[in-house]
Amino acid sequence: MKGFFKSSIGKKLIMSISGLFLILFLLFHLCMNAVVLFSECAYNSVCAFLGSNWYAVAGTVILAAGFLVHIVYAFVLTIQNRKARGTDRYDSQNLPKEVEFASKNMLVLGIIIFCGLITHFGQFWAKMMFADLIGCEEAESLSTNGAYWINYYFHECGALSIVLTVVYLIWFAALWLHLNHGFWSAFHTAGLSNKTWIPRLKCIAKWFSTIVCLGFAVIVIYAACGGIKVPQGCCKDKQAVECQQSTQTPCQQESNK
Amino acid sequence: MSENKGLNLTLKVWRQKDRHSKGQFKEYKVENISTEASFLEMVDILNEQLINTNDPDGPVAFDHDCREGICGMCSLFINGRAHGPDDAITTCQLHMRKFKDGETITIEPWRSGGFPVIKDLMVDRSAYDKIMQAGGFVSVSTGGVPDANAIPIPKADADEAMDAAACIGCGACAATCKNGSAMLFVSAKVSQLALLPQGKVEAAKRAKAMVAKMDELGFGNCTNTGACELECPKQVSISHIARLNREFLKANIKD
């Protein structure tokens, strides 16, 4: 395997494997989030289960490595490809309509997804994973209350909730496009396709990306419509709410008042 | 019989003195071009006109040879598409009936890092030859032609190999690809041999050598846009790219 990962195909295979790994994570994430549609308490149990175990931390580290590899290689390959394309551009280029929009704009879509991730991390993941680092013990009672945070951001924040709902839906649209191409492309790069399987993989990619993104969108819209009820007993502690709010932005605090 | 009225066209042609000079578009008018003429014949008429009028830039340099879609020499980017507006044909097979009277036609050379412009519309495609030299062959002892049925080959494999072998190495794939990738060309050449018993002996060595040469020559990485397949005059499928990836992975695992 000497020099394999330095070759163009080797580098693409790294993108492919890390992409498939992230696709698996997305499926897991959707399954986990979908629980909130059926039972807020059950969802909070999932949050508690995933937030306080060493294997959840180990999983987070592996996941972060997957993201990092995927992002770094995306930029490395794009830089190489731009160089390979040369400095001269066509006066006009009319590519056939069959060339997917997503396939031509994977980096841009990836950047949009990354920006969405940062927002998402700040709103949910950081609050739930680093509650004990915030500085007050009471915050921990909300750290496992995922239902509270979903309801809070998508329903309780007034105008901010509407903006966040729209932003998340745009994020899911970018994710749909990225997955739509990335899914079948990952198999193709790994050599797992042929004339018969290319159309099949493209079809599976469409279904998969639609199910995943629609699933996330349904949860957000459901929450925006006030469908998620915060379980009693989880958020009674006023001190805990105040403590969490102290870590929020002024806009968020204003909307709480 | 009514007289067939010819086309009056404006040609926006890329003119570049040599590899190191900066090029630019120049506009020329051609009149009364027969709709029966091929595109290259129309460029021939333009060149005759440029010679007769002592144009300071001289005739337009462009590649051509067989003029029947076999050799892969013609390489023009016409109105934003490799080999012009029609699908699955080379520039030499393109006819003027595909254009309208009074139309402006933009003619450019291949633009890709791997294909530097030599002059006007001619590009240096020797990079493809170098990739072929690296491993696009079968080492066999010469001798009498063996009986066609001596080595049984499944029909599906033979058909797939023939489809891959249809690649004429014109360079439309790399010229169209937004990444300047030559993967369709390399995969076609690797596939046509890897599918047949005679080529399987050196399959691993071939895949590694050709990919290494492709990377060394600075071609880009394939991102599976599929534009190459759509613009390929021989409609070589991107399924060959998946085969190349498999062959390359297998070859490296064997090491």
Image: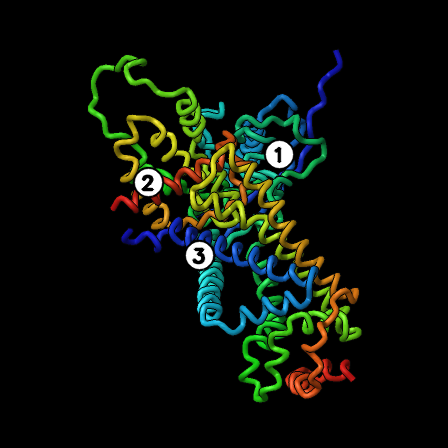
Among the two numbered marks 2 and 1 on one chain, the one whose residue lies closer to the N terminus: 1
Where residue B251 is drawn, which disc sits there? none
Q: What residue is rendered at 57% in x and 88% in y?
A: A135
Residue B66's quadrant in the figure? top left
Q: What residue is rendered at 67% in x and 27% in y?
A: B32
Query: Where residue A131 sits in the image (x, y, percent)?
Result: 57, 81
Dot 1, how many residues are within 10 Å of its Cα: few (below 14), some (14-19), or many (20+)?
Answer: some
The amino acid type of the residue labelled 2 equals: Ala
**Secondary structure beneath label 1:** loop
Decide if residue B54 is in sight here: no
On the image, numbered disc 2 is attached to which residue?
B207
Where residue B85 is drawn, which disc sits there? 1
Q: Nearer the viewer, mark 3 or mark 2?
A: 2
Q: Quadrant of the N terminus of chain B?
A: top right
Subunit that carries the residue with mark 2 = B
Q: What residue is rendered at 51% in x and 46% in y?
A: A185
Query: Where residue B23 sits in the image (x, y, percent)?
Result: 52, 50
Where residue A80 is drawn, which disc sits there? 3
The amino acid type of the residue labelled 1 equals: Pro
Above or below: residue B124 compared with residue B146: below
**Secondary structure beneath label 2:** helix
Residue reaching furthest to the top? B1
Name the residue nearer the viewer: A213 or B234: A213
Is disc 3 in the same subunit as disc 1?
no
Subunit that carries the residue with mark 3 = A
Name the residue nearer the viewer: B226 or A28: A28
Circles 3 and 2, Cβ within 8 Å, touching? The answer is: no
Q: CA distance from mark 3 to mark 1?
A: 30 Å
Q: CA distance from mark 2 to mark 1?
A: 34 Å
**Secondary structure beneath label 3:** helix
